[in-house]
Image (tube, coloured by chain):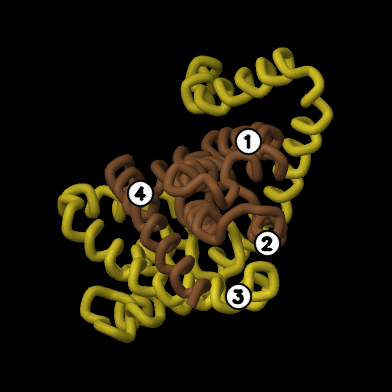
Chain colours: A yellow, B brown
Amino acid sequence: MKCPLFIRRYRLAILALIAFILFIIFFPEQAPKASASLLTQVKNMFIIVPPIFLLLGLLDVWVPREIMIKFMGKESGIIGGVLAFTLGTAAAGPLYASFPVASMLMKKGASFFNILIFVGAWSSTKIPMLLFEMESLGSRFALSRLAIDIIGIILIALAIKATVPKKEVERIYQEAENQN
Amino acid sequence: MNFENILPQFITVLILIAILLTVFTADTISKLIGSETGFIGVFVAAIIGSITLIPSFVAFPLAGELMKNGAGALQIASFVSTLVMVGLATLPLEIKYFGKRITITRNVLAFVFSFGVAYFVNWMVSL
């Protein structure tokens, strides 16, 4: 019974596709733009996904668990946090690209707090983009945003760590094992 | 590593982004978050930033242009912050990796934090 399983797994995607088609039906003048936009997104996917998965493959093979645990595991202290932040901010990719990488780090044994720092850094600060942001929005804007983001990332990571039950954390680590 | 595993969520995300980018043109955005719009503008900017997912190298010049054309630094800072930190369109994928609870918590906190970012950046810029 392969067909129903397919529908179940892809039901969200199918819904989105229906929404897209409805959108084009109700706003036909937007159709060329919307289709071009979709094509761009698909193109982006082919550009972003392979490098990420290549990187993950390399990470998986080259970084033994012991090293990851030593540098970014629970007992790694400040070094772990700084490392997590550095990795996150150095990465130049959209938010959603951080999730598979975070998952791999989880599988390898990075601590939950460091994972949160990593995603936070990846999402808000982007050193490669800093100069560009300074140019477009002004250096005061970019640098002050960076400064408060560093504080915010830490605060948010602490808040999430404090409020999410341990069972849930264990569950997603298990999921990371299964995923990879 | 199995890409097919996350393919459904990925497809959903791509389609959502495509629709949203079509709707939110520069013109629409500037009408909604000009510098006169005050706190409402900040809130609207935060909502728009949360929903949209524009790559940084497109978003930064866009935001720069908006500021030149009348959007306030306050609103733009709110927009930029939520743009990069909050991802409504990417929720399906995030939930797949982190579960509902963490995903919602993180996005809500990032959303609220962006208001702080907006006022701080605006203050720094006006010094």
If you read the primary sequence from the N terminus, does the residue marked by circle 2 or circle 4 appear first? 2
Left of A111 or right of it: where is B23?
right
Residue B71 appears in view? yes
Q: In which quarter of the image is residue A57?
A: bottom right
Give me the disc on residue B64: 2
Q: Is residue B21 above or below residue B70?
A: above
Q: Mark 4 points at which residue?
A: B98
Kind of residue at badge 2: Gly
Element on which disc 4 rests: helix
Q: Residue at x 59, y 67 (%)?
A: A55
Foreground label between 4 and 1:
1
Q: In which quarter of the image is residue B8?
A: top right
The foreground one among B46 and A156 is B46
The disc numbered 2 marks a residue on which chain? B
Q: Name the residue under label 3.
A: A130
Give me the disc on residue B104: none
